[in-house]
Image (spheres, rainbow, N blue to C red):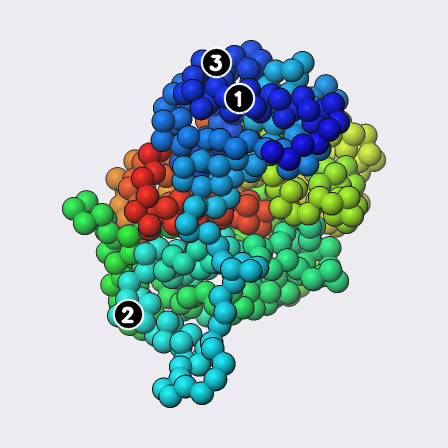
Amino acid sequence: MTVHPDPDSLEAAAWLATLEAALSRQDATAAARLFGEECYWRDLVALTWNIRTVEGRDGLADMLRATLPRAQPRGFTLTEPASRNGDALEAWFRFETDAGRGTGHLRLRNGLGYTILTTLQELKGHEEKSGVTRERGLEHGAQRGRRTWTDLRRAEQAELGISRQPYVLIIGGGQGGIALGARLKRLGVPALIIEKNARAGDSWRNRYRSLVLHDPVWYDHLPYIPFPDHWPVFTPKDKMGDWLEAYVTLMELNYWTSAEVTGARFDEASQDWSVEVTRQGQTLTLRPRHLVFATGSYGPPRELRPPGAETFAGVQYHSSKHVSGEPFRGKRCVVVGANSSAHDVCADFWEHEAAEVTMIQRTPTTVVRSESLMEIAFAPIYSQEAAAKGIDVDKADMIFASVPFRLMADLQRPVYAEIAARDADLIGRLNAQGFMTDYGPDGSGLMMKALRTGSGYYLDVGCSDIIASGGIKVKPRAEIARLTGDAAILTDGSEVKADVIVYATGYLPMNEWVAKIVSREAADLIGPNWGYGSGTRGDPGPWEGELRNMWKPLRHPNLWFHGGNLHLSRFNSKFVALQLKARFEGMETPVY
Protein backbone atom coordinates (compact mmCIF):
# COMPACT_ATOMS: atom_id res chain seq x y z
CA MET A 1 0.00 0.00 0.00
CA THR A 2 1.23 3.48 -0.86
CA VAL A 3 1.80 5.33 2.43
CA HIS A 4 1.32 9.07 2.78
CA PRO A 5 2.59 9.84 6.30
CA ASP A 6 0.66 13.03 7.02
CA PRO A 7 -2.14 12.73 9.63
CA ASP A 8 -4.99 13.37 7.17
CA SER A 9 -3.75 10.67 4.80
CA LEU A 10 -3.22 8.22 7.64
CA GLU A 11 -6.79 8.82 8.80
CA ALA A 12 -8.23 8.33 5.32
CA ALA A 13 -6.10 5.22 4.68
CA ALA A 14 -7.14 3.71 8.02
CA TRP A 15 -10.82 4.35 7.24
CA LEU A 16 -10.48 2.72 3.82
CA ALA A 17 -8.69 -0.27 5.38
CA THR A 18 -11.53 -0.71 7.87
CA LEU A 19 -14.06 -0.44 5.02
CA GLU A 20 -12.17 -3.01 2.98
CA ALA A 21 -12.07 -5.43 5.93
CA ALA A 22 -15.86 -5.19 6.30
CA LEU A 23 -16.38 -5.64 2.57
CA SER A 24 -14.07 -8.66 2.45
CA ARG A 25 -16.19 -10.28 5.21
CA GLN A 26 -19.31 -9.49 3.16
CA ASP A 27 -20.53 -7.58 6.20
CA ALA A 28 -22.68 -4.87 4.68
CA THR A 29 -24.03 -3.78 8.06
CA ALA A 30 -20.55 -3.19 9.47
CA ALA A 31 -19.54 -1.31 6.33
CA ALA A 32 -22.61 0.93 6.58
CA ARG A 33 -21.82 1.72 10.23
CA LEU A 34 -18.60 3.38 9.07
CA PHE A 35 -20.75 6.14 7.57
CA GLY A 36 -22.65 8.95 9.23
CA GLU A 37 -26.44 9.03 9.37
CA GLU A 38 -26.40 11.31 6.32
CA CYS A 39 -24.30 9.53 3.74
CA TYR A 40 -24.12 8.84 0.01
CA TRP A 41 -22.47 6.17 -2.12
CA ARG A 42 -22.38 7.05 -5.81
CA ASP A 43 -21.36 4.16 -8.04
CA LEU A 44 -20.60 4.42 -11.73
CA VAL A 45 -20.70 0.82 -12.99
CA ALA A 46 -18.03 -0.52 -10.60
CA LEU A 47 -20.30 -2.38 -8.17
CA THR A 48 -23.81 -1.97 -9.53
CA TRP A 49 -23.32 -2.22 -13.32
CA ASN A 50 -25.43 0.90 -13.25
CA ILE A 51 -25.27 4.66 -12.68
CA ARG A 52 -26.62 4.72 -9.14
CA THR A 53 -26.53 6.75 -5.93
CA VAL A 54 -27.77 5.21 -2.70
CA GLU A 55 -28.45 7.29 0.40
CA GLY A 56 -28.38 6.61 4.14
CA ARG A 57 -26.90 3.66 6.01
CA ASP A 58 -29.81 1.39 5.12
CA GLY A 59 -29.51 2.27 1.43
CA LEU A 60 -25.77 1.60 1.48
CA ALA A 61 -26.22 -1.70 3.29
CA ASP A 62 -28.89 -2.89 0.85
CA MET A 63 -26.70 -2.04 -2.14
CA LEU A 64 -23.66 -3.77 -0.65
CA ARG A 65 -25.58 -6.94 0.24
CA ALA A 66 -26.74 -7.19 -3.36
CA THR A 67 -23.41 -6.44 -5.03
CA LEU A 68 -20.58 -7.64 -2.76
CA PRO A 69 -20.78 -11.39 -3.50
CA ARG A 70 -20.08 -10.83 -7.19
CA ALA A 71 -18.07 -7.59 -7.19
CA GLN A 72 -15.60 -8.42 -4.36
CA PRO A 73 -14.20 -4.86 -4.07
CA ARG A 74 -10.72 -4.71 -2.57
CA GLY A 75 -7.31 -3.06 -2.74
CA PHE A 76 -8.46 0.38 -1.58
CA THR A 77 -5.30 2.52 -1.75
CA LEU A 78 -4.75 6.26 -1.61
CA THR A 79 -3.37 7.68 -4.84
CA GLU A 80 -2.29 11.05 -3.41
CA PRO A 81 -2.21 12.78 -0.03
CA ALA A 82 -5.58 13.48 1.55
CA SER A 83 -6.63 17.09 2.12
CA ARG A 84 -9.07 19.18 4.13
CA ASN A 85 -11.94 21.08 2.51
CA GLY A 86 -14.02 22.87 5.13
CA ASP A 87 -15.26 20.29 7.63
CA ALA A 88 -14.53 17.37 5.27
CA LEU A 89 -11.44 15.23 4.85
CA GLU A 90 -11.14 14.34 1.15
CA ALA A 91 -9.12 11.54 -0.41
CA TRP A 92 -8.60 9.96 -3.82
CA PHE A 93 -8.15 6.21 -4.05
CA ARG A 94 -7.93 3.27 -6.40
CA PHE A 95 -9.47 -0.17 -5.96
CA GLU A 96 -10.36 -3.28 -7.91
CA THR A 97 -13.21 -5.74 -8.26
CA ASP A 98 -13.38 -9.19 -9.78
CA ALA A 99 -14.37 -7.56 -13.07
CA GLY A 100 -12.13 -4.53 -13.25
CA ARG A 101 -10.14 -1.70 -11.75
CA GLY A 102 -11.47 1.63 -10.61
CA THR A 103 -10.82 4.97 -8.99
CA GLY A 104 -12.81 6.80 -6.40
CA HIS A 105 -13.19 9.74 -4.07
CA LEU A 106 -14.01 9.86 -0.37
CA ARG A 107 -15.25 12.54 2.03
CA LEU A 108 -15.12 11.97 5.79
CA ARG A 109 -16.82 14.16 8.36
CA ASN A 110 -15.95 13.65 12.03
CA GLY A 111 -14.27 10.38 11.16
CA LEU A 112 -17.34 8.92 9.42
CA GLY A 113 -18.06 8.46 5.74
CA TYR A 114 -20.08 11.25 4.18
CA THR A 115 -19.77 10.71 0.42
CA ILE A 116 -17.98 8.05 -1.56
CA LEU A 117 -17.65 7.74 -5.33
CA THR A 118 -16.60 4.49 -7.00
CA THR A 119 -16.03 4.40 -10.76
CA LEU A 120 -15.05 1.55 -13.05
CA GLN A 121 -12.11 2.58 -15.23
CA GLU A 122 -11.15 -0.64 -17.01
CA LEU A 123 -12.13 -4.29 -17.34
CA LYS A 124 -9.55 -6.91 -16.41
CA GLY A 125 -8.24 -8.65 -19.49
CA HIS A 126 -9.89 -6.07 -21.73
CA GLU A 127 -7.86 -2.95 -21.04
CA GLU A 128 -7.43 -0.25 -23.67
CA LYS A 129 -4.11 -0.57 -25.46
CA SER A 130 -1.99 2.46 -24.70
CA GLY A 131 1.58 3.40 -23.83
CA VAL A 132 3.73 0.28 -23.64
CA THR A 133 0.79 -1.91 -24.71
CA ARG A 134 0.01 0.12 -27.83
CA GLU A 135 -0.32 -1.77 -31.11
CA ARG A 136 2.92 -2.13 -33.04
CA GLY A 137 1.38 -1.33 -36.41
CA LEU A 138 2.57 -2.91 -39.64
CA GLU A 139 5.83 -4.85 -39.45
CA HIS A 140 8.95 -3.66 -41.21
CA GLY A 141 10.61 -5.88 -43.79
CA ALA A 142 9.78 -7.38 -47.17
CA GLN A 143 6.41 -9.11 -47.38
CA ARG A 144 4.51 -10.48 -50.35
CA GLY A 145 0.86 -9.58 -50.56
CA ARG A 146 1.35 -6.83 -47.98
CA ARG A 147 -1.79 -5.02 -46.91
CA THR A 148 -1.05 -1.45 -45.94
CA TRP A 149 -2.83 0.54 -43.24
CA THR A 150 -4.90 2.17 -45.99
CA ASP A 151 -5.87 -1.26 -47.37
CA LEU A 152 -6.96 -2.49 -43.97
CA ARG A 153 -8.85 0.70 -43.13
CA ARG A 154 -10.73 0.68 -46.43
CA ALA A 155 -11.61 -2.99 -45.95
CA GLU A 156 -13.00 -2.28 -42.48
CA GLN A 157 -15.09 0.61 -43.81
CA ALA A 158 -16.41 -1.50 -46.68
CA GLU A 159 -17.29 -4.50 -44.52
CA LEU A 160 -18.87 -3.14 -41.32
CA GLY A 161 -22.60 -2.87 -41.81
CA ILE A 162 -22.46 -4.70 -45.14
CA SER A 163 -20.82 -8.12 -44.86
CA ARG A 164 -20.12 -7.88 -41.12
CA GLN A 165 -22.58 -6.58 -38.58
CA PRO A 166 -21.72 -4.06 -35.86
CA TYR A 167 -22.22 -5.10 -32.27
CA VAL A 168 -23.35 -1.55 -31.46
CA LEU A 169 -25.25 0.82 -33.73
CA ILE A 170 -25.14 4.48 -32.66
CA ILE A 171 -27.89 6.75 -33.97
CA GLY A 172 -26.49 10.28 -34.14
CA GLY A 173 -23.03 11.41 -35.16
CA GLY A 174 -22.67 14.57 -33.09
CA GLN A 175 -20.31 14.93 -30.15
CA GLY A 176 -22.11 12.25 -28.11
CA GLY A 177 -22.05 9.57 -30.78
CA ILE A 178 -18.48 10.43 -31.72
CA ALA A 179 -17.20 10.28 -28.12
CA LEU A 180 -18.89 6.93 -27.54
CA GLY A 181 -17.66 5.62 -30.89
CA ALA A 182 -14.09 6.53 -29.93
CA ARG A 183 -14.37 4.73 -26.57
CA LEU A 184 -15.77 1.59 -28.23
CA LYS A 185 -13.07 1.69 -30.92
CA ARG A 186 -10.36 1.73 -28.25
CA LEU A 187 -12.05 -1.20 -26.51
CA GLY A 188 -12.30 -3.28 -29.68
CA VAL A 189 -16.11 -3.27 -29.87
CA PRO A 190 -17.41 -3.17 -33.48
CA ALA A 191 -19.53 -0.03 -33.64
CA LEU A 192 -21.08 1.95 -36.46
CA ILE A 193 -22.27 5.56 -36.19
CA ILE A 194 -25.22 6.72 -38.32
CA GLU A 195 -25.35 10.44 -39.17
CA LYS A 196 -28.04 12.00 -41.34
CA ASN A 197 -25.91 14.98 -42.38
CA ALA A 198 -23.45 14.95 -45.29
CA ARG A 199 -20.34 15.41 -43.12
CA ALA A 200 -19.27 14.77 -39.58
CA GLY A 201 -19.59 18.05 -37.72
CA ASP A 202 -22.53 19.30 -39.79
CA SER A 203 -24.76 19.17 -36.72
CA TRP A 204 -22.74 22.25 -35.65
CA ARG A 205 -22.03 23.78 -39.08
CA ASN A 206 -25.71 23.79 -40.05
CA ARG A 207 -26.78 25.93 -37.11
CA TYR A 208 -27.10 29.71 -37.19
CA ARG A 209 -24.05 31.67 -38.33
CA SER A 210 -23.35 33.47 -35.07
CA LEU A 211 -23.35 30.40 -32.82
CA VAL A 212 -20.36 30.04 -30.49
CA LEU A 213 -20.05 27.52 -27.65
CA HIS A 214 -21.08 29.17 -24.39
CA ASP A 215 -18.91 26.84 -22.27
CA PRO A 216 -15.12 27.35 -22.06
CA VAL A 217 -12.52 25.18 -23.78
CA TRP A 218 -11.37 23.49 -20.55
CA TYR A 219 -14.88 22.07 -20.16
CA ASP A 220 -15.30 20.90 -23.74
CA HIS A 221 -12.50 18.44 -24.60
CA LEU A 222 -13.25 15.14 -26.34
CA PRO A 223 -11.79 11.85 -25.03
CA TYR A 224 -8.17 11.03 -25.90
CA ILE A 225 -7.41 14.12 -28.02
CA PRO A 226 -7.71 17.40 -26.08
CA PHE A 227 -7.91 20.72 -27.85
CA PRO A 228 -4.44 22.22 -28.45
CA ASP A 229 -3.31 24.89 -26.03
CA HIS A 230 -3.90 27.74 -28.49
CA TRP A 231 -7.59 26.83 -28.97
CA PRO A 232 -9.97 29.75 -28.29
CA VAL A 233 -11.79 29.87 -24.97
CA PHE A 234 -15.16 29.85 -26.76
CA THR A 235 -15.23 27.72 -29.91
CA PRO A 236 -17.10 29.00 -33.01
CA LYS A 237 -19.58 26.45 -34.31
CA ASP A 238 -17.85 25.88 -37.68
CA LYS A 239 -14.52 25.38 -35.97
CA MET A 240 -16.18 22.83 -33.70
CA GLY A 241 -17.61 21.07 -36.73
CA ASP A 242 -14.19 20.85 -38.34
CA TRP A 243 -12.69 19.48 -35.12
CA LEU A 244 -15.34 16.75 -34.91
CA GLU A 245 -14.76 15.79 -38.54
CA ALA A 246 -11.00 15.58 -38.03
CA TYR A 247 -11.54 13.59 -34.83
CA VAL A 248 -13.64 10.99 -36.68
CA THR A 249 -10.79 10.54 -39.16
CA LEU A 250 -7.98 10.45 -36.59
CA MET A 251 -9.78 8.00 -34.30
CA GLU A 252 -10.65 5.82 -37.33
CA LEU A 253 -14.33 5.68 -36.46
CA ASN A 254 -16.77 3.78 -38.64
CA TYR A 255 -19.13 6.58 -39.55
CA TRP A 256 -21.83 6.66 -42.20
CA THR A 257 -22.88 10.09 -43.42
CA SER A 258 -26.03 10.92 -45.40
CA ALA A 259 -27.66 8.01 -43.60
CA GLU A 260 -30.84 7.87 -41.58
CA VAL A 261 -32.45 5.22 -39.39
CA THR A 262 -36.07 4.87 -40.47
CA GLY A 263 -37.18 1.99 -38.27
CA ALA A 264 -35.99 -0.58 -35.76
CA ARG A 265 -37.45 -3.78 -34.34
CA PHE A 266 -36.12 -5.84 -31.44
CA ASP A 267 -36.18 -9.64 -31.65
CA GLU A 268 -36.83 -11.01 -28.17
CA ALA A 269 -35.67 -14.50 -29.18
CA SER A 270 -32.30 -13.55 -30.68
CA GLN A 271 -31.86 -10.40 -28.57
CA ASP A 272 -30.76 -8.57 -31.72
CA TRP A 273 -32.13 -5.53 -33.48
CA SER A 274 -33.29 -5.28 -37.07
CA VAL A 275 -32.62 -1.69 -38.11
CA GLU A 276 -33.66 -0.12 -41.41
CA VAL A 277 -31.18 2.48 -42.67
CA THR A 278 -31.48 4.66 -45.74
CA ARG A 279 -28.04 5.55 -47.05
CA GLN A 280 -27.38 7.51 -50.20
CA GLY A 281 -30.62 6.32 -51.79
CA GLN A 282 -30.30 2.69 -50.70
CA THR A 283 -32.20 0.90 -47.95
CA LEU A 284 -30.15 -1.48 -45.83
CA THR A 285 -31.02 -3.73 -42.89
CA LEU A 286 -28.48 -3.86 -40.07
CA ARG A 287 -28.56 -6.35 -37.22
CA PRO A 288 -26.70 -4.97 -34.20
CA ARG A 289 -27.00 -6.40 -30.71
CA HIS A 290 -27.27 -2.97 -29.07
CA LEU A 291 -28.89 0.26 -30.23
CA VAL A 292 -27.73 3.60 -28.80
CA PHE A 293 -29.66 6.83 -29.27
CA ALA A 294 -27.02 9.58 -29.22
CA THR A 295 -29.22 12.38 -30.50
CA GLY A 296 -28.10 15.09 -28.08
CA SER A 297 -29.78 15.57 -24.72
CA TYR A 298 -33.29 15.60 -26.11
CA GLY A 299 -35.65 14.39 -28.77
CA PRO A 300 -37.36 16.10 -31.73
CA PRO A 301 -38.13 19.84 -31.66
CA ARG A 302 -41.14 20.87 -29.58
CA GLU A 303 -43.16 22.38 -32.41
CA LEU A 304 -45.77 25.04 -31.66
CA ARG A 305 -48.70 25.77 -33.95
CA PRO A 306 -50.97 28.43 -32.43
CA PRO A 307 -54.57 28.91 -33.55
CA GLY A 308 -54.62 30.86 -36.79
CA ALA A 309 -51.13 29.71 -37.81
CA GLU A 310 -52.44 28.84 -41.26
CA THR A 311 -53.60 32.43 -41.79
CA PHE A 312 -50.26 34.05 -40.93
CA ALA A 313 -48.78 35.52 -44.12
CA GLY A 314 -45.20 35.63 -42.87
CA VAL A 315 -42.57 32.98 -42.13
CA GLN A 316 -42.74 30.57 -39.16
CA TYR A 317 -40.21 27.97 -38.03
CA HIS A 318 -38.63 26.30 -35.00
CA SER A 319 -35.33 27.73 -33.77
CA SER A 320 -33.53 24.50 -34.74
CA LYS A 321 -34.04 25.57 -38.36
CA HIS A 322 -32.65 29.09 -37.90
CA VAL A 323 -29.60 29.78 -40.07
CA SER A 324 -29.23 33.56 -40.32
CA GLY A 325 -31.09 36.80 -39.77
CA GLU A 326 -29.88 38.12 -43.13
CA PRO A 327 -33.12 37.32 -45.06
CA PHE A 328 -35.10 39.31 -42.47
CA ARG A 329 -33.18 42.55 -42.61
CA GLY A 330 -35.74 45.36 -42.17
CA LYS A 331 -38.45 42.90 -41.07
CA ARG A 332 -40.48 42.62 -37.87
CA CYS A 333 -39.18 39.57 -36.00
CA VAL A 334 -40.86 37.77 -33.11
CA VAL A 335 -39.14 35.05 -31.09
CA VAL A 336 -41.23 32.85 -28.79
CA GLY A 337 -39.15 31.82 -25.78
CA ALA A 338 -36.54 33.43 -23.57
CA ASN A 339 -33.81 30.85 -23.07
CA SER A 340 -30.45 30.27 -24.80
CA SER A 341 -31.61 29.70 -28.38
CA ALA A 342 -34.16 32.52 -28.15
CA HIS A 343 -31.45 34.97 -27.09
CA ASP A 344 -29.07 33.85 -29.83
CA VAL A 345 -31.77 34.15 -32.51
CA CYS A 346 -32.88 37.58 -31.24
CA ALA A 347 -29.28 38.82 -31.23
CA ASP A 348 -28.84 37.52 -34.77
CA PHE A 349 -31.92 39.39 -35.99
CA TRP A 350 -30.72 42.56 -34.23
CA GLU A 351 -27.23 42.27 -35.74
CA HIS A 352 -28.82 41.94 -39.18
CA GLU A 353 -30.77 45.15 -38.63
CA ALA A 354 -34.27 43.81 -38.33
CA ALA A 355 -36.84 46.60 -38.14
CA GLU A 356 -38.05 45.31 -34.78
CA VAL A 357 -37.20 42.31 -32.61
CA THR A 358 -39.61 41.15 -29.90
CA MET A 359 -39.07 38.32 -27.42
CA ILE A 360 -42.14 36.69 -25.91
CA GLN A 361 -41.27 35.47 -22.40
CA ARG A 362 -43.67 33.20 -20.54
CA THR A 363 -41.63 32.47 -17.37
CA PRO A 364 -38.50 33.91 -15.71
CA THR A 365 -35.04 33.15 -17.08
CA THR A 366 -31.81 32.68 -15.17
CA VAL A 367 -29.32 35.06 -16.77
CA VAL A 368 -25.63 34.88 -15.87
CA ARG A 369 -22.88 36.95 -17.43
CA SER A 370 -20.30 34.72 -19.08
CA GLU A 371 -17.49 36.44 -17.20
CA SER A 372 -19.18 35.82 -13.86
CA LEU A 373 -19.75 32.14 -14.54
CA MET A 374 -16.17 31.70 -15.73
CA GLU A 375 -14.63 33.44 -12.72
CA ILE A 376 -16.89 32.08 -9.99
CA ALA A 377 -18.34 28.74 -11.10
CA PHE A 378 -15.88 27.32 -13.66
CA ALA A 379 -12.58 28.67 -12.30
CA PRO A 380 -12.06 26.18 -9.44
CA ILE A 381 -11.89 23.12 -11.72
CA TYR A 382 -12.37 24.06 -15.42
CA SER A 383 -9.93 26.90 -16.15
CA GLN A 384 -6.34 27.68 -17.02
CA GLU A 385 -5.68 28.37 -13.34
CA ALA A 386 -7.07 24.98 -12.33
CA ALA A 387 -4.96 23.24 -14.97
CA ALA A 388 -1.87 25.01 -13.62
CA LYS A 389 -2.67 23.51 -10.21
CA GLY A 390 -2.75 20.00 -11.67
CA ILE A 391 -6.51 19.72 -12.14
CA ASP A 392 -6.69 18.37 -15.68
CA VAL A 393 -9.99 17.64 -17.40
CA ASP A 394 -10.15 14.05 -16.13
CA LYS A 395 -9.67 15.07 -12.51
CA ALA A 396 -12.11 17.96 -12.92
CA ASP A 397 -14.73 15.52 -14.22
CA MET A 398 -14.19 13.26 -11.21
CA ILE A 399 -14.47 16.19 -8.78
CA PHE A 400 -17.79 17.13 -10.37
CA ALA A 401 -18.96 13.50 -10.29
CA SER A 402 -18.06 13.11 -6.62
CA VAL A 403 -20.91 15.38 -5.49
CA PRO A 404 -24.24 13.53 -5.13
CA PHE A 405 -27.25 15.21 -6.70
CA ARG A 406 -28.87 15.57 -3.28
CA LEU A 407 -26.10 18.00 -2.23
CA MET A 408 -25.67 19.99 -5.42
CA ALA A 409 -28.37 22.64 -4.94
CA ASP A 410 -27.09 23.59 -1.48
CA LEU A 411 -23.56 23.95 -2.87
CA GLN A 412 -24.75 26.06 -5.78
CA ARG A 413 -26.76 28.59 -3.75
CA PRO A 414 -23.76 30.52 -2.39
CA VAL A 415 -22.19 30.47 -5.86
CA TYR A 416 -25.27 32.14 -7.33
CA ALA A 417 -25.60 34.55 -4.42
CA GLU A 418 -22.12 35.79 -5.35
CA ILE A 419 -23.03 35.85 -9.05
CA ALA A 420 -26.25 37.76 -8.26
CA ALA A 421 -24.26 40.44 -6.44
CA ARG A 422 -21.76 40.72 -9.28
CA ASP A 423 -24.44 40.80 -12.02
CA ALA A 424 -26.87 43.06 -10.14
CA ASP A 425 -26.52 46.01 -12.51
CA LEU A 426 -27.29 43.92 -15.60
CA ILE A 427 -30.20 42.14 -13.92
CA GLY A 428 -31.64 45.46 -12.76
CA ARG A 429 -31.50 46.91 -16.27
CA LEU A 430 -33.12 43.76 -17.71
CA ASN A 431 -35.92 43.90 -15.15
CA ALA A 432 -36.48 47.58 -15.97
CA GLN A 433 -37.24 46.52 -19.56
CA GLY A 434 -39.79 43.99 -18.31
CA PHE A 435 -37.53 40.95 -18.73
CA MET A 436 -38.19 38.51 -15.88
CA THR A 437 -35.25 36.85 -14.12
CA ASP A 438 -34.71 34.40 -11.29
CA TYR A 439 -32.06 32.05 -9.96
CA GLY A 440 -34.34 29.04 -9.96
CA PRO A 441 -37.12 28.11 -7.52
CA ASP A 442 -34.57 27.53 -4.75
CA GLY A 443 -31.85 30.00 -5.70
CA SER A 444 -29.53 27.27 -6.98
CA GLY A 445 -29.04 28.89 -10.36
CA LEU A 446 -28.14 27.93 -13.88
CA MET A 447 -26.45 24.56 -13.43
CA MET A 448 -29.32 23.04 -11.48
CA LYS A 449 -31.78 24.25 -14.12
CA ALA A 450 -29.55 22.61 -16.73
CA LEU A 451 -29.60 19.30 -14.84
CA ARG A 452 -33.29 19.44 -13.93
CA THR A 453 -34.83 20.47 -17.25
CA GLY A 454 -32.05 21.57 -19.62
CA SER A 455 -33.87 24.88 -20.03
CA GLY A 456 -34.78 28.15 -18.36
CA TYR A 457 -31.43 29.93 -18.56
CA TYR A 458 -29.13 32.05 -20.70
CA LEU A 459 -25.37 32.42 -20.35
CA ASP A 460 -24.98 35.99 -21.50
CA VAL A 461 -22.60 36.44 -24.41
CA GLY A 462 -24.05 39.76 -25.56
CA CYS A 463 -27.80 39.62 -26.06
CA SER A 464 -28.70 40.70 -22.53
CA ASP A 465 -27.16 44.13 -23.01
CA ILE A 466 -29.21 44.63 -26.19
CA ILE A 467 -32.38 43.80 -24.23
CA ALA A 468 -31.34 46.01 -21.32
CA SER A 469 -30.75 48.88 -23.73
CA GLY A 470 -34.17 48.46 -25.34
CA GLY A 471 -32.85 47.16 -28.67
CA ILE A 472 -34.89 43.98 -28.27
CA LYS A 473 -38.40 44.40 -26.87
CA VAL A 474 -39.82 41.97 -24.32
CA LYS A 475 -43.39 40.79 -23.81
CA PRO A 476 -43.30 39.17 -20.34
CA ARG A 477 -45.84 36.78 -18.78
CA ALA A 478 -47.38 36.17 -22.18
CA GLU A 479 -47.91 33.52 -24.81
CA ILE A 480 -49.36 33.58 -28.31
CA ALA A 481 -53.13 33.20 -28.08
CA ARG A 482 -53.62 33.23 -31.87
CA LEU A 483 -52.16 34.51 -35.10
CA THR A 484 -53.64 36.81 -37.72
CA GLY A 485 -52.32 37.54 -41.17
CA ASP A 486 -49.65 39.92 -39.92
CA ALA A 487 -49.56 39.72 -36.13
CA ALA A 488 -49.42 37.63 -32.98
CA ILE A 489 -52.24 38.25 -30.53
CA LEU A 490 -50.92 37.52 -27.03
CA THR A 491 -52.65 36.17 -23.95
CA ASP A 492 -52.36 39.60 -22.31
CA GLY A 493 -54.50 41.02 -25.11
CA SER A 494 -51.70 42.90 -26.86
CA GLU A 495 -50.83 42.63 -30.54
CA VAL A 496 -47.31 42.27 -31.96
CA LYS A 497 -46.90 42.85 -35.68
CA ALA A 498 -44.67 40.25 -37.32
CA ASP A 499 -43.13 39.21 -40.63
CA VAL A 500 -41.36 36.20 -39.11
CA ILE A 501 -42.02 34.13 -35.97
CA VAL A 502 -39.37 31.79 -34.57
CA TYR A 503 -40.47 29.25 -31.99
CA ALA A 504 -37.57 28.75 -29.56
CA THR A 505 -39.73 26.31 -27.63
CA GLY A 506 -37.19 23.60 -26.87
CA TYR A 507 -37.27 19.89 -27.52
CA LEU A 508 -39.20 16.79 -26.54
CA PRO A 509 -37.56 14.00 -24.49
CA MET A 510 -35.32 11.44 -26.20
CA ASN A 511 -37.91 8.69 -25.91
CA GLU A 512 -39.89 10.51 -28.62
CA TRP A 513 -37.17 9.43 -31.04
CA VAL A 514 -37.80 5.89 -29.82
CA ALA A 515 -41.50 6.38 -30.56
CA LYS A 516 -40.69 7.45 -34.12
CA ILE A 517 -38.12 4.74 -34.83
CA VAL A 518 -39.08 1.75 -32.65
CA SER A 519 -42.62 2.08 -31.27
CA ARG A 520 -44.84 4.12 -29.00
CA GLU A 521 -44.95 1.17 -26.61
CA ALA A 522 -41.14 1.07 -26.32
CA ALA A 523 -41.01 4.83 -25.76
CA ASP A 524 -43.63 4.66 -23.01
CA LEU A 525 -41.89 1.70 -21.38
CA ILE A 526 -38.67 3.71 -21.11
CA GLY A 527 -40.19 7.07 -20.21
CA PRO A 528 -38.58 10.50 -20.63
CA ASN A 529 -34.94 11.29 -19.97
CA TRP A 530 -33.18 14.06 -18.04
CA GLY A 531 -33.93 15.54 -14.64
CA TYR A 532 -33.39 13.71 -11.37
CA GLY A 533 -36.75 14.01 -9.61
CA SER A 534 -36.07 17.27 -7.77
CA GLY A 535 -39.77 18.10 -7.52
CA THR A 536 -39.26 21.49 -9.14
CA ARG A 537 -41.16 22.75 -12.21
CA GLY A 538 -40.43 20.51 -15.18
CA ASP A 539 -38.65 17.91 -13.05
CA PRO A 540 -41.34 16.07 -11.08
CA GLY A 541 -40.68 13.44 -8.45
CA PRO A 542 -40.17 10.79 -7.34
CA TRP A 543 -36.54 11.34 -6.40
CA GLU A 544 -34.17 9.55 -8.79
CA GLY A 545 -30.77 10.68 -7.52
CA GLU A 546 -29.32 10.41 -11.04
CA LEU A 547 -30.33 11.79 -14.41
CA ARG A 548 -33.25 9.76 -15.73
CA ASN A 549 -32.47 7.11 -18.32
CA MET A 550 -29.03 8.44 -19.21
CA TRP A 551 -25.91 6.29 -19.77
CA LYS A 552 -27.30 3.20 -18.07
CA PRO A 553 -29.50 0.18 -18.85
CA LEU A 554 -33.05 1.13 -19.79
CA ARG A 555 -36.22 -0.84 -19.17
CA HIS A 556 -36.11 -1.95 -22.79
CA PRO A 557 -33.37 -4.54 -23.39
CA ASN A 558 -30.29 -3.61 -25.45
CA LEU A 559 -31.35 0.01 -25.83
CA TRP A 560 -29.36 2.98 -24.49
CA PHE A 561 -29.48 6.78 -24.30
CA HIS A 562 -26.21 8.69 -24.53
CA GLY A 563 -25.79 12.45 -24.80
CA GLY A 564 -25.48 15.73 -22.99
CA ASN A 565 -23.13 18.64 -23.47
CA LEU A 566 -19.48 18.07 -24.33
CA HIS A 567 -18.55 17.56 -20.68
CA LEU A 568 -21.27 15.02 -19.91
CA SER A 569 -20.79 13.20 -23.23
CA ARG A 570 -17.05 12.95 -22.68
CA PHE A 571 -17.20 11.71 -19.09
CA ASN A 572 -20.13 9.32 -19.36
CA SER A 573 -19.10 7.83 -22.70
CA LYS A 574 -16.53 5.79 -20.77
CA PHE A 575 -19.19 4.16 -18.61
CA VAL A 576 -21.54 3.41 -21.50
CA ALA A 577 -18.61 1.90 -23.40
CA LEU A 578 -17.50 -0.28 -20.48
CA GLN A 579 -21.05 -1.57 -20.01
CA LEU A 580 -21.23 -2.47 -23.70
CA LYS A 581 -17.74 -3.98 -23.73
CA ALA A 582 -18.58 -6.24 -20.79
CA ARG A 583 -21.63 -7.52 -22.62
CA PHE A 584 -19.62 -7.94 -25.84
CA GLU A 585 -17.15 -10.15 -23.96
CA GLY A 586 -19.93 -12.22 -22.39
CA MET A 587 -19.29 -11.01 -18.84
CA GLU A 588 -22.09 -11.18 -16.30
CA THR A 589 -23.48 -7.72 -15.63
CA PRO A 590 -26.18 -7.96 -12.95
CA VAL A 591 -27.73 -4.50 -12.70
CA TYR A 592 -28.58 -3.12 -9.25
Residue 464, can we see it?
no
Labels 2 and 3: the sequence-earlier one: 3
- Helix, strand or loop at label 2? It is loop
- Residue 77 position within the rendered picture, expressed as x and y whole percent measured from the top left: 59, 33
The number of numbered discs placed on residues in the rendered structure image is 3
Kindly give the residue lying farthest to the left in the view shown.
Answer: 269
Residue 92 image-quadrant placement: top right
Of the 4 image quadrants, the one containing the C terminus is top left
Image height of 328 relative to 150, above or below: above
- What residue would you read off at disc 3? 30
Labels 3 and 1: the sequence-earlier one: 1
- What residue would you read off at disc 2? 162
In-image side of 512 versus 6 (left or right)? left
Front residue of 506 and 434: 506
The residue depicted at 66 percent of the width and 59 percent of the height is 227
Image height of 506 relative to 14, above or below: below
The residue depicted at 51 percent of the width and 44 percent of the height is 121
